[in-house]
Amino acid sequence: MAITVDEKAGDGSQEAAPGKKRRRLHLLPKSWRPPEPAADGSMELVDHLRELRYRVIVSILAVLAVALCCFIFYNQLTAVAFHPIQQAIEVYRAKNPGAEVEITTTNVTGGFTLFMKVPFIAGFILSCPVWLYQLWAFIAPGLLSNERRAAIRFLGTSIPLFLTGVLLGYWISPKGFAVLLQFNPPGVLNLNDANEFLTFELTLLLVFGVSFLLPVVLVTLNRFGIISGAGLGKFRSMAIFLCFLFSAVATPSTDPISMCVLAVPMSFLYVIAEVLCKRHDKRQVAEQQQ
């Protein structure tokens, strides 16, 4: 992880003098550190690859550190991870008396794989502040003072949005799993491999979490001048349709309520991003006219 420190000017102010490079404090060895960007933030292609390597390493170390802490709460985390499927099995058995559904581990290494997977999944989700920051830092390596404030706003919105999406996916998943179990033929034993289920559950949670980052992505692209608020307005109807189409594919349930649980917030977040981008575009036009 890199921490940017501005060199103080002669008068003791906190802002660095123009043209001076900022010193960055690193937590990794010198050979692993990213190159210092130029004053305007530009970098060569090779330097971008070194920067990417550094951001990936820091993100992995953060996931590992949090995962190690999660091993202490392995039993509690396992109960949380399998709570949705347990609820779904209870609903399925209530509607189909005598139905047989079991959660299993296959082969001799199945239990060990499960023991390792649960903490690492929790570590990946809980360490999202670190890898989301590393993602932003890679996009804008040469952060100026106003851009550092933008990074704080980026983290301040992306972290709660991502976690809200994950929690929403966790909340809606039991109903979706119960619907999927209904396709099991009567009299057929349904065996669910615990490790495969965790992979499927993690994919579902990430889909919900990343979907809620839609406004952050749109506003960031607008700040870089790639898209405009007016363009988002023209594309609004198609975007809302695509949100519902994406939700229909992403949610495991076949009922419209589960689809709307994801599609409606995504559409609402798109409209919020459109409003923010239009306000930003108006400010830019006003500044250029002055």
Image (tube, rainbow, N blue to C red):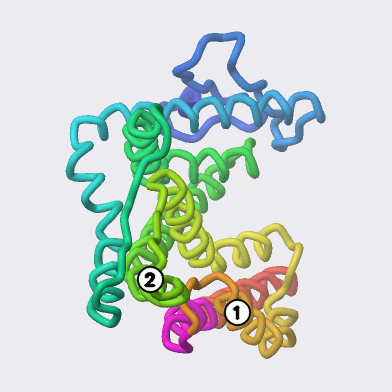
In what element is the residue under mark 2?
A: loop
Residue 155 point in image, percent of width and height: 44, 52
- Residue 129 visible in the picture: no
Q: Which residue is tagged 2?
A: 187
Category of crowding for the residue at label 1, using alpha-carbon neighbours closer than 10 angstroms: few (below 14), some (14–19), many (at least 20)? many
Q: Amino acid at mark 2?
A: Gly
Please count the marks in the image: 2
Rendering quarter of residue 233? bottom right
- Find residue 212 and name its label: none
Residue occupying the point 45% across, 74% down? 185
Q: Residue furthest front?
A: 187
Give the amino acid type for the residue marked by disc 1 in the picture.
Answer: Cys
Q: Is residue 276 left or right of residue 157?
A: right
For the point 25% across and 59% down, which residue is it?
A: 83
**At x 71% / y 86%, what residue is drawn?**
238
Image spot of residue 135 (x, y percent): 57, 43
Considering depth in this image, is 12 or 83 the residue closer to the camera? 83
Image quarter of residue 249: bottom right
The C terminus lies in which quarter of the figure? bottom right
Does residue 40 appear left or right of residue 184 in this picture? right
| Residue 262 sits inside the magenta stretch | yes
Which residue range is magenta in the image?
255-267
Residue 269 in percent (x, y) is at 50, 76
Going from the N terminus, do you reach mark 2 or mark 1 first?
A: 2
- 156 up-or-down from 62: above or below: below
Horizontal side of residue 97 vs 180, given as left or right: left
- Residue to which mark 1 is pinned: 243
Q: Where is 18 relative to 144, above or below? A: above
